[in-house]
Amino acid sequence: MSQEESQKKEKDPEGIDGIMEKLQQKLQGLLGDQYGVKVMMPAMQTPPPKAKKETEEESPPEIEFELLPSQLEAYLEDYVVGQPEATLALATKVCTHFHRVAWEMRHEIVDHLVGEVKANMLIIGPTGVGKTYVVRLIAEKLGVPFVKGDATKFSETGYVGGDVEQLVRDLVRQADGSVELAENGIIYLDEIDKIAGGGVTHGPDVSRTGVQRNLLKLMEESEVDLRAPFDLASQMEAMIEAQRTGKVQRKKVNTRNILFMMSGAFVGLDDIIKRRLRKKLIGFEAEPETDQEDPFWLLSQVRSEDLLAYGFEPEFVGRLPIVIVFRPLDEEKLFEILKNPMSPLTQGKVRDFASYGIELEIEEEALEEIAHRASTEGTGARGLKSILEQCLLPLEHSLPGSGINKVVVTINAVKEPQVFLAQILVEGALVSFVTEFRERTGIRLSFTPQSRHWIVEQAIQQKMEVKRYCEQQFAGYEYGLKLAEKKSLRIGLNACKNPRSFLDSLIKKAYASKGETLRDEREGPAISPDHKEDS
């Protein structure tokens, strides 16, 4: 070996050129297999690595976390309804976790206490009570990377399904590629109860328990390769980076400080707890608890042995030391959710209509009816969303472009959406006609309830739009009312049935009044008879 080659070997102990050549050959073979032809890859030249300045030494970023548990709890209570115990527990444990991480980084503590378990959390509660919502709120408030996954989409290696380590890689993507920031993020897994095994050693339960074991590695402290194996895109990215920087780096993500939060409905867990409590009561001849039929009370009594009986591995349960239970939402709480000014349900619909230039307002009676209907479905806040969409869909479809810029949703909109829509369109057509008439003439028109009903009936019979019918019926009013010197007019049923004769009578009265005024000026004051207007 020449002296030059020896020096090159010392500078490049990993053999970058050899690695680049192997990657090039592998990629060429893959492309050839794909397209059935021999693909020639251009030679890749590895530029010399840039000299690193002494001032560019890498150091982990400092985490400044000053939010107190009481502050985070107050923030959550502004958005979350009916979960005081859950918001308190979540705010306390999340804040303590990140304060602990910041403290250890400030004091450069790298050793892990033997036997210590990180404050990963298990959230239990029926569907639609806000489990996912509250975790998203926490991540947004803290400003940390956040990834949500569905436990049912993962499986043990060798089975069809995703790789749980992909959650960590997704966390890095959420952190815009910053490994350091991702190492202090939150991973949230929903429907974790679906991977509970049934105590068998074959069939799908094997895969479920395998997912538990794979998650166990992440929940402790492990190193996750940022580039997934057998991922062609990742390998090509690595090859390009190696060509650009002159070195091959295997980036890894440490999961030591990543907070894992898992949730599920855990259907049937209350029965397991109830059986355990009954055995205990019988064994000690104690008085039965009065709250044993309350689902929330039962779930709040959950113990590790109950989760083991449900089908979780002991090691998996041991890595979830914090168990938080959410309350079911009754009709009153569902109404509070809708009424809450921070509610994404109602405020989301307000913004939907605002995007069309329409101001949306929902009366409390309508919200109460929506909450009542949702409570009968048993799907929590999800029922609110579906019913709200059903009620407002006709309005959302027909009002844009109608000229209506404000709508007040009443209880009738919930009970009979199509009838309510028809009424709104009629009102909108009349408002549009009156507005355009006032803009042209300066004269303010209004309609009595009887006249509105008459106009709608006639428009339907003649198969005409309400606005077009009004324009046709009151075609001569623009000039006639000016002759009558009217600044405003309330149109009643008589004017609707006989618009021409009614206008003529107004003009005659106006001219008669002028004649009397001229005579009075010549002959002196006199009492003139009253003239009744249509109402």
Image: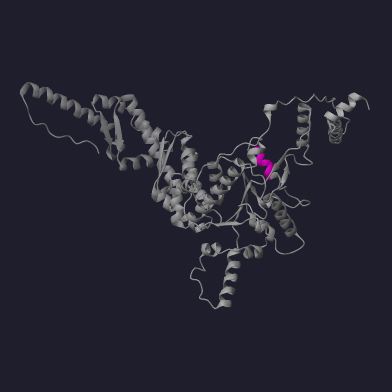
Name the residue nearer the viewer: 335 or 62: 62
Tell me the chief SS of the magenta region. helix
Q: Position of residue 521 (x, y in %)?
A: 9, 22
Asked whether residue 429 is in view, the answer is yes
Q: In the drawing, does residue 2 fall left or right of residue 106?
A: right
Q: How many numbered tags mark residues here?
A: 0
Residue 168 colored magenta?
yes
At x 72% / y 55%, what residue is drawn? Answer: 213
Task: Determine the image quadrant of residue 106.
Answer: top right
At x 54% / y 62%, what residue is drawn? Answer: 300
Residue 388 colored magenta?
no
Q: In the drawing, does residue 75 fall left or right of residue 164?
A: left
Name the residue nearer the viewer: 303 or 14: 14
Which residue extends farthest right? Answer: 1
Task: Name the colour scheme.
Answer: one colour
Asked whether residue 460 is in view, the answer is no
Which residue extends farthest left? Answer: 524
Magenta-highlighted residues: 167-173
The image quadrant where one finds the C terminus is top left
Name the residue nearer the viewer: 455 or 302: 302
Which residue extends farthest bottom? Answer: 285
Q: Position of residue 344 (x, y in %)?
A: 49, 44
Q: In the drawing, does residue 228 fall left or right of residue 172?
A: right
